[in-house]
Each structure stands twice: as structure tokens, then as C-alpha cells.
Amino acid sequence: MTRCGFVAIVGAPNAGKSTLLNRLTGAKLSIVSPKAQTTRFRVLGILMRGESQILLVDTPGIFKPKRRLDRAMVRAAWIGAEDADLVLLLVDAKTGATEPVREIAASLGARGGKAWLILNKTDLVPPARLLPLTAELNALATFEHTYMVSAAHGDGLDELLDALAAAVREGPHLYPEDDLTDLPDRLLAAEIVREQIFMQTHEEVPYAATVETESFQERKDGSVRIEVTIYVSRASHKAILIGAGGARIKEIGARARAQLGDLLERRVHLFLNVKERAGWDEEGARLRAIGLDTSEE
Ligand SMILES: Nc1nc2c(ncn2[C@@H]2O[C@H](COP(=O)(O)OP(=O)(O)O)[C@@H](O)[C@H]2O)c(=O)[nH]1
Ligand SMILES: [Mg+2]
């Protein structure tokens, strides 16, 4: 008898949600950076464990939204939680039960549904801190189980995976067993470029940029030609992204191309284009282009 189910990972920005998804699937599906709010939409990771197919959903961090982009991101996170059979609340054990974490736990408690508590980054804290943190969070919502893991180092993940495999419902697999994600290659290309912007630029620049794949053409020689546009809201950001003599954009392109070559398993020709477009983060069409739903506004 096979099993299959959706499991959503929710939590505050920077808890390590995307790191956990990537580590469990063994592939870089969701982009990770030390900066908050890197993930902007739901990313599905397809995981096989024995006869179980675990459909793991990475979500944007839940925080107090200001821009229209932020509101759409937070909504995507909650929709991810609602659509799932099981929700994992991932908490950074180092920062602990901060106010935003307590609010998310309380909302989960109020919504009902199955939830597990996962304390992450256990490599950064003394074990004695973990039990009081577990007790504090369990007072806010009913968690069926608590697991303590290090998504970055892999500690505790085998136990977590076994438990997930046993917890998902009996039923047919919804995706082919060797698929890793339902993310289309065009979106993956844009995300890999966006990750390099997060890694290589600072302050508000990565937050004020969005990336769209304009064209994605498979060529006869087996390679792929990808054209990507980076939208920024200000001329000064455009200058920073391009860098002196084009050095920055060249480096962003070079690293993104290498990563895409690995992910797509073929030669990639990547062309980057930077355009200034004030207010893109309030524009429905731009938000939909990166996979966010703006229909509720
Ligand atoms: N030390 C340590 N760092 C981690 C762990 N998990 C994630 N991180 C780091 O935390 C930061 C945020 O991770 P990310 O997965 O992007 O968080 P997200 O915003 O919740 O998706 C990154 O710098 C990760 O490398 C962990 O288990 N231990
Ligand atoms: Mg993330």
C-alpha cells in the first residue's frame, strides 16, 4: 500500500525552511540566503521514503507585511499551510520563541489541523535550552510531535523523515517518483538568478528586485538559451547591480549559469538584462509573473 500527502513547512523568516526542504530532497529547489524573506512563493519538493511520497511545501516566511508583494507572500504561506495535510512549524532554536514565532504558533493553534513542532539550528544552542522552548511553544498550540534537527548539518533528519513517511495518508502517489519538484524550469532559472542577487548585493537592493524569465529555448545541440530580466525600482539599484564596468552583473550571470547547468543537466547560455521599473512590487502582473496570486486584492 502506498502513501502520499502534503506537508507544509511554515515559520518566521530565516528559520531555515528552505534549507530543510533542500536537505530533505537532496536538491537545491528553494533558494537560501542569510537574508530574511528570500523565498517568495510556495516551492514543492517531492520526496520518496519507502512506499511513501512526501510532498513537502516550502513557504515564504510569515511576518508583518507592508508592500503588496509582502502581503501576497504571507498569504501564499498561509494558503500553503491550509492546503496541507500536516504543518511543520519550523523554529530557529537560537532566536527562540520570539513574538512573531509566538503569533504564528497561536494562529496555527486557532486554525486547528495537524501540526508538528520542529526546532531547527540545534547545532547553535546548548541542548538544555531546547526543552523549555518546546514547553513554551506547546502552550500556544497542540503539536502532535516535536523534533529537534539541524537542517544545515543533517542531525535528526532521518527520524523526521521516517515519521513523515509513516504519517502521510494511504493513497496513490500524485507525482512520478523521480520528479523532484513541480517548479517549471523558467521559474527555476529566475530563482537561481535572484539567489545570486541576494548573495552578491546588499541592503535594500535584493528586496527591491524581481526576476522574470523572458525566454527559454532548447537548442538543437542540447543546450538551452535563457533570457532573464531583472526589474529594479530605482536607477541607483540598477547601477549597483551592473557594477563598475559591468563586473557585478557578469559575476551574477556566471554563478547563476554554472548552477543552472548543474540543475538542468545541460549547457546553459544565460543572458541578463536589468530594467528600471518603479513600483513593480505593487504591480499585479509582476507579482503573478513570479507565481504569486493577487486575486484577493
Ligand atoms: N547553523 C545553522 N544554520 C542554519 C540551519 N538551517 C538554516 N541555517 C541558515 O539560516 C539562514 C536562513 O536559511 P533559509 O533556509 O533561507 O531560511 P528560510 O527563510 O526559513 O527559508 C541561512 O543562512 C542558512 O544557512 C541550521 O540547522 N544550522
Ligand atoms: Mg526560504
Image (cartoon, grey):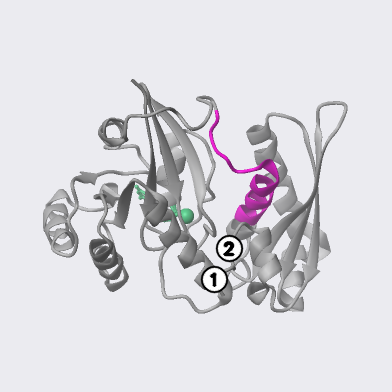
**Amino acid residing under circle 2:** Asp
Q: Which corner quadrant holds the C terminus?
A: bottom right
Which circle marks residue 158 in the picture?
Answer: none
Residue that mark 1 sits on: 296
Image coordinates for residue 275, horizontal then vertical, percent: 80, 68
Which circle marks residue 293 in the picture?
Answer: 2
Image coordinates for residue 23, horizontal then vertical, percent: 43, 38
Magenta segment includes 183: yes
**Left or right of 93, for residue 74:** right
Residue at left offset 55%, top offset 77%: 67
Q: Give the dominant element type of the magenta stretch: helix, strand or loop.
A: helix
Residue closest to the eye, 278 or 170: 170
Residue at left offset 68%, top offset 52%: 190
Which quadrant holds residue 200?
bottom right
Cβ atoms under marks 2 and 1 closer than 8 Å: yes
Residue at left offset 41%, top offset 70%: 63
Image coordinates for residue 80, horizontal then vertical, percent: 43, 54
Residue closest to the eye, 24 or 267: 24
**Amino acid residing under circle 1:** Glu
Which quadrant holds residue 40?
bottom right
Q: Residue 35: in sight, yes or no?
A: no
Disc 2 secondary structure class = loop
**Left or right of 83, for residue 221:** right
Which quadrant holds residue 156?
top left
Q: Which residues are magenta?
A: 179-196
